[in-house]
Image: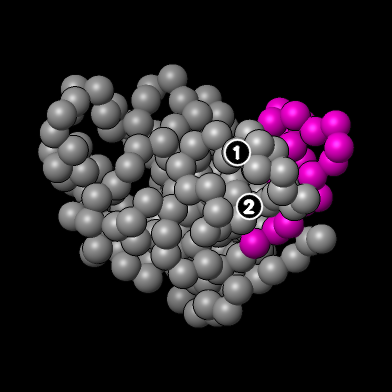
Amino acid sequence: MTKRVAIFISGGGSNMVKLVDSMVGDHPARPILVLANSDDAGGLAHARARGIATETVDHRPFKGNRDAFEAELQRVIEPYAADFLCLAGFMRVLTAGFVTPWAGRMLNIHPSLLPKYKGLHTHQRALDAGDAVAGCTVHEVTAALDDGPILGQARVPILPDDTAETLAARVLTQEHKLYPAVLRRFVSGERSPLIWGE
């Protein structure tokens, strides 16, 4: 039976596009919803162009009331009966109240080799630390920020003349390959980590 995947975004949605475009043919899942926390998220247009339902739950009216924001997220996505939820550049921290019911069914991609550099500015932090390698991680979502079992990592060498921007661009190329590969395995019940790169 085909699994149903909802995807949360905040911006242009490049990872969302790669996930959506991968869920074709013999893939065990299909995208059924793209939700953003802002009407001006560029990824919404990409989703609509692909015939996927879109929703927006603007976080701004809920300022200071995360519980109410998350309750509205759950209310909006409920009718879509999603089996899995993918965060693809969704820039809102979700609490245990939202995450716990999705335990084992919710993925995120993060632009570092977790457990290193949770949070923001990951590429600059890797450069500042003098790391030789950077990369990205797909992991199950738990209530702890950028935590949860690691399902995949792609490693990217840091070059002598790298800036945060050039490194980010090379890591993003790997994100676009890693996330679809891990999702396909995950919805098929495969939880062993997929690791590649330098």
Range of residues picked out in magenta: 153-171
Q: Secondary structure at mark 1?
A: helix
For residue 136, which numbered disc appears in the image? 2
Q: Which residue is mark 1?
A: 125
Of 105 and 143, which appears nearest the observer?
143
Q: Is residue 58 left or right of residue 43?
A: left
Outermost residue to the top? 40
Q: Is residue 83 visible?
A: no
Identified at 60% across, 38% down, the residue is 125
Amino acid type of the residue tagged 2 in the rendering:
Cys
Residue 157 x/y as whole percent: 81, 50
Disc 2 crowd rating (10 Å Cα; few below 14, some 14-19, many 20+) is many
The stretch drawn in magenta includes residue 159 = yes
Residue at coordinates 29% horizontally, 47% vertically from top-left? Answer: 94
Per the model, the C-alpha gap separating discs 2 and 1 is 14 Å
* Residue 124 figure quarter: top right
Rendering coords of residue 116 (x, y %): 55, 54
Residue displayed at 75% across by 65% down = 196
Q: Percent from the top left, x then y, of residue 198? A: 82, 60
At x 66%, y 71%, the residue is: 194
Q: Which of the two discs, 2 and 1, labels the residue nearer the N terminus?
A: 1
Q: Is residue 115 visible?
A: yes
